[in-house]
Image: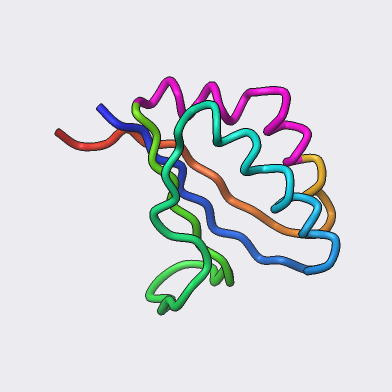
Amino acid sequence: MKGYWIAHVTVHDIEQYKNYTDLAPKAFAPYKAKILARGGRYQQLEGEERHRHVIIEFSSFDDALNCYNSDIYQQAAMQRQGVATAEVVIVEGAE
């Protein structure tokens, strides 16, 4: 079954956040990740509001987890520290 990253992000410093957005796609490429949603229009219905929402599809849960734990993604995630607040979850798709 496919795996999905679901992230909710509030960016505090858009200029510094670009360091993350420039590096993160390099981590996704080896896993052939497909971005299904990134930014764009949304309506907050419940919970704490975040201003950016991202859904990324992977061929499997393990690929999604391995991508997150990869050295290159962890380097990207370090660039996000202090300039954005993020919640990231990896879920397995339904059959």
Q: Nearer the viewer, residue 52 or 22?
A: 22
Q: Quadrant of residue 57?
A: top left
Q: Which residues are magenta?
A: 60-77
> On screen, 90 above or below 22?
above
Side of 81 relative to 86 (left or right):
right
- The residue depicted at 80 percent of the width and 40 percent of the height is 78
Residue 23 belongs to magenta span = no
Q: Residue 79's x, y, as percent?
A: 81, 46
Residue 54's place in the image compared with 13, above or below, is above
Q: Is residue 62 above or below residue 52?
A: above
Question: Image quadrant of residue 75?
Answer: top right
Question: Left or right: 28 with respect to 17?
Answer: left
Between 78 and 50, the one nearer to me in the picture: 78
Quadrant (top left/top right/bottom left/bottom right) for the C terminus: top left
Quarter of the rendering containing residue 46:
bottom left
Q: Residue at x 66, y 66 (%)?
A: 10
